[in-house]
Image (tube, rainbow, N blue to C red):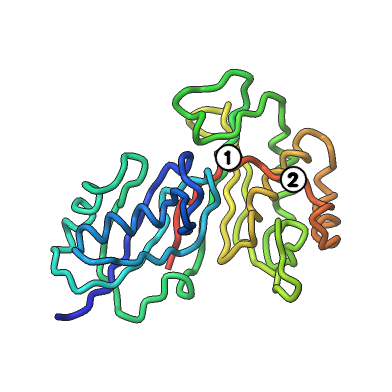
Amino acid sequence: MLERTIKLTVAYDGTEYHGWQIQPGLKTIQNTLCESVSQVCQKPTHIQGAGRTDAGVHAQGQVGLFKTTHTHPIDTLHHAINKHLPRDIVVRSAEEVISDFDVIRHVLQKHYQYTIHLSRVPCVRTARFSWLYPGPLDCQVMQEAAQSLKGEHDFRSFACTVEPDQNTVRSLDACYVHLSEQDPNYLLIDVKGHGFLHRMVRIIVGTLVDIGKGHWPASHMPEILAARDRKAAGHLAPPEGLCLMAVDY
């Protein structure tokens, strides 16, 4: 039987999971998805992800890839998989791709969005998907600082863990701070780039928040980059506000 290569677009609420990657004895997105796809394909099936998301981080457009000889029609495959998934994980679509498609190397851009709820009172509908921040933030100053991060830089100051010989140069296509058009009580930070260091987006967000509350001026961001030292940047923003929106190929 011919082997097929299947690309899945997956959304999930990461609140109850220990991140994407399979970890022995822990509930993860990847493991849960592998089990569900294995039931549909009627044999153990491994799903490779476009990248890892940390515990508590969400996705609207994570991408998974697997190979199978099962003949289930592609147009209803995602529905079949969803029947075996919990409510907080959804396969949005499934498509066949060429056999040598590489879910990691062929990535052109990843889009992350971080949501901050500017309020002292939580909202039940968004509490799992936003950082409740009670103080005022200067969105304009944060946006000014964010522009210093666009382009190619050494982002070592924004990495939680770095291997001794690891290349920490990355390129950001966009880093944009703006209030939500639907509700100005929500501040959104969109970050787009080809690849990211460990917890890089959350450290960027934490640093921008420190600038937005007046801890540093916007002009301090280039100094943070130049320091190449995690201690020079701001704190780590909590995971619940972060969402992987899309992976483009």
> What amino acid type is highlighted by mark number 1?
Leu
- The residue lying at 51 percent from left, 22 percent from top is 123
Q: Earlier in the sequence, mark 2 or mark 1?
A: 1
Whether 146 is drawn above or below 43: the answer is: above
Measuring from the top left, give residue 27's x and y in whole percent.
44, 48
Q: Residue furthest top?
A: 121
Measuring from the top left, give residue 182's x and y in whole percent.
48, 30
Quadrant assignment for the C terminus:
bottom left
Judging by the rendered image, the residue that carries numbered circle 1 is 188
Q: Nearer the viewer, residue 213 or 124?
A: 124
Does dot 2 land on a helix, a strand or a loop? helix
Does dot 1 land on a helix, a strand or a loop? strand
Quick one: label 1, few (<14), some, or many (20+) residues within 10 Å? many
Q: Nearer the viewer, residue 224 or 41?
A: 41
Q: How many marks?
A: 2
Quarter of the image for residue 2 reads bottom left
- The residue lying at 55 percent from left, 22 percent from top is 122
- The residue lying at 67 percent from left, 24 percent from top is 134
Using residue 197 as the reference point, say whether residue 153 is left or right of it. Answer: right
- The residue lying at 16 percent from left, 56 percent from top is 76
Quarter of the image for residue 159 reads bottom right
Q: Nearer the viewer, residue 201 or 153?
A: 201
Measuring from the top left, give residue 226's x and y in whole percent.
84, 62
Measuring from the top left, give residue 107's x and y in whole percent.
47, 69
Q: Which mark is residue 207?
A: 2
> What amino acid type is highlighted by mark number 2?
Thr
- Judged by depth in the image, the label closer to the viewer, 2 or 1, is 2
Marks 2/1: CA–CA distance: 14 Å
